Image (cartoon, rainbow, N blue to C red):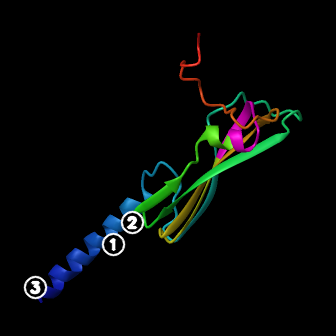
Amino acid sequence: MKKSLKLAVISAFAVLGSIVATSCAAPLPVGCLYTDITLPGSVGDGNLDKSVNRYGSASCYSILGWVAGGDASINEAAVNGNIDKIAWTSFHATNYFGIYGIYKTEVFGTGKAFGPDQTLAPSSGSDKK
């Protein structure tokens, strides 16, 4: 009887712990089995007029939370979309069972075509004379 009670208490704490770890007070809405969300970003001037004519995205991935890679920076998304003036950004996350996740930064704005050696990254100052 004591062994069954002990097992029941341990199981209850394990279930409670997994619920708390996956749902309460998370910085993003996260589903235990599946997540597919789009959230607003915090960069840009918020210009929602029709002059916004460019879209760029950049993504990264995660496998089991053990391995992750990619560049989902705003700079990479802007470069990918040839954007030089950002109007707004958004963030998209898709995750399957906590096993595989794709995280994408989306940038909307206006721009011109970049040359092969131009980026939106700030200059290091080494090119100043």
Disc 3 element:
helix
- Rendering coords of residue 35 (x, y %): 57, 64
- Rendering coords of residue 87 (x, y %): 75, 32
Q: Quadrant of residue 86?
A: top right
Quadrant in the picture for the N terminus: bottom left
- Residue ID for mark 1: 15
Disc 1 element:
helix
Point 54% across, 18% down: residue: 125
Q: Nearer the viewer, residue 11 or 66?
A: 66
Question: Which of the two labelled residues, at mark 3 and mark 2, occupies the earlier sequence position?
Answer: 3
- Rendering coords of residue 76 (x, y %): 63, 42
In 3D space, how far apart are the residues under numbered discs 3 and 2 (Cα atoms)? 26 Å
Callout 1 amino acid:
Val
- Residue ID for mark 3: 2
Range of magenta residues: 78-90
In 3D space, how far apart are the residues under numbered discs 1 and 3 (Cα atoms)? 20 Å
Callout 2 amino acid:
Ile
Question: Which of the two labelled residues, at mark 1 and mark 3, occupies the earlier sequence position?
Answer: 3
Disc 2 element:
helix
Q: Is residue 54 magenta?
A: no
- Residue ID for mark 2: 19
Callout 3 amino acid:
Lys
- CB atoms of marks 1 and 2 within 8 Å: yes
* Residue 9 versus residue 81 in the image, above or below: below
Q: Nearer the viewer, residue 113 or 68?
A: 113
